[in-house]
Amino acid sequence: MPKKKSVTSLAQQSVGIRLSSHEKICSERMSNLITSIERLEKKVDTLSDSVSKGKGIVSVLVFLGSIFAAFIGFINYK
């Protein structure tokens, strides 16, 4: 009679093979996720820089517009 231990060891080996292939697939997925997250972080950084520049330009335009309006008001006052 064959030992039961050999049957269970065969099952454990097949489970081990399936687990190792599953871990390989999961590690590949994780590396893909990490690279996509890094790309998204770079895009968010560039977008935040663009928004900051836009806010700066708008504030400068508002300042220049207020000076121009004050000048026009001063000329019309006289």
Image (cartoon, helix red, strand yellow):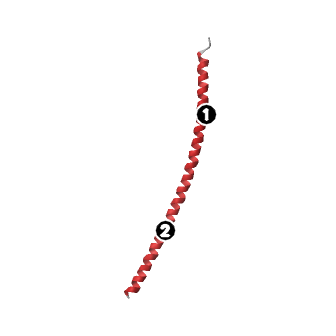
Please give the name of the residue rendered at 47% of the width and 66% of the height, measured from the top-left corner.
55
Q: Position of residue 70 (x, y in %)?
A: 41, 80
Q: Residue flagged by tag 2: what amino acid is it? A: Gly
User: How far separated are the C-alphas under marks 1 and 2?
Assistant: 53 Å
Which residue is disc 1 drawn over? 21
Please give the name of the residue rendered at 55% of the width and 56% of the height, measured from the top-left corner.
43
Q: Residues within 10 Å of mark 1 (few under 14, many from 20)?
A: few
Q: Residue flagged by tag 1: what amino acid is it? A: Ser
| Corner quadrant of residue 69 | bottom left
Q: Position of residue 74 (x, y in %)?
A: 40, 84
| Label whose residue precedes the other's in the sequence (1 or 2) | 1
Q: Residues within 10 Å of mark 2 (few under 14, many from 20)?
A: few
Please give the name of the residue rendered at 54% of the width and 53% of the height, measured from the top-left corner.
41
In the rendered structure, find residue 56 and report the number of the disc placed on it. Answer: 2
Determine whether the residue tagged by mark 2 lies in a helix, strand or loop. Answer: helix
- The image shows residue 30, relative to residue 16, as above or below, that is below
Q: Position of residue 31 (x, y in %)?
A: 59, 44
Please give the name of the residue rendered at 50% of the width and 66% of the height, measured from the top-left corner.
54
In the rendered structure, find residue 8 and report the number of the disc placed on it. Answer: none
